[in-house]
Amino acid sequence: MTAASIYVEQPVTPAESRTTLALLAFDGFLCAVLSVLFLPAYFGTMPFPISILVAAVVNLLLVLGARKFTDRAILTALPIFGWLLGFLVCVLGGPGGDLLVFSDWRTLLLFVAAVLPAGVYLFRVQLESMVVRAQG
């Protein structure tokens, strides 16, 4: 008998699910802000926007985590909505006209790379659920 066979997962209450989904949405917001702050990073004299890759992986992991707590696609997408809100806040700029996001290729690549993997996963999940509903 191994430890994995003894482990019993406790059922999650609706309150715990809502709290976890809210925290995952906040994590998406934080991911966006930190991705934008580290976007202009350089490695020597070469631009090194590692935050683009980190944002893509983290957003996908946040959506996968949200999927464990709900079957509804709109609630599973809460981390992406949090990320989009954080990105929008960074794009709007401050009261003095200062900007966190510049008009260059890294900003567009950050937006596409952060949203696309999680969006494709959500689309696939929604498509599979529609097929199951149509068959059953």
Image: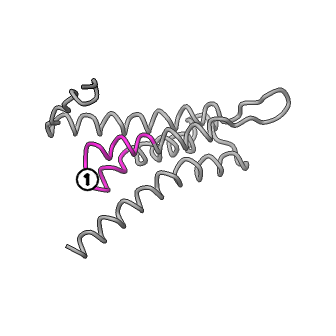
How is the structure coloured here? one colour
Picture residue at 47% right of the left edge, 42% below the top: 59
> 7 or 42: which is nearer to us?
7
Picture residue at 19% right of the left edge, 31% below the top: 8
Judged by its main secondary structure, the magenta piece is helix
Residue 20, percent from left and from top: 28, 35
Residue 31, percent from left and from top: 50, 35
Quadrant location of residue 132? bottom left
> 90 or 96: which is nearer to us?
90
Please determine whether, in this image, residue 91 is positioned above or below residue 116.
above
Residue stretch rendered in magenta on the structure? 61-78
Q: Amino acid at mark 1?
A: Asp
Q: Residues within 10 Å of mark 1 (few under 14, many from 20)?
A: few
Residue 1 appears in the figure: yes
Q: Residue furthest front?
A: 1
Residue 72, percent from left and from top: 26, 55
* Residue where numbered disc 1 is placed: 71
Quadrant location of residue 46? top right
41 vs 100, left or right, is right
Secondary element at image label 1: loop
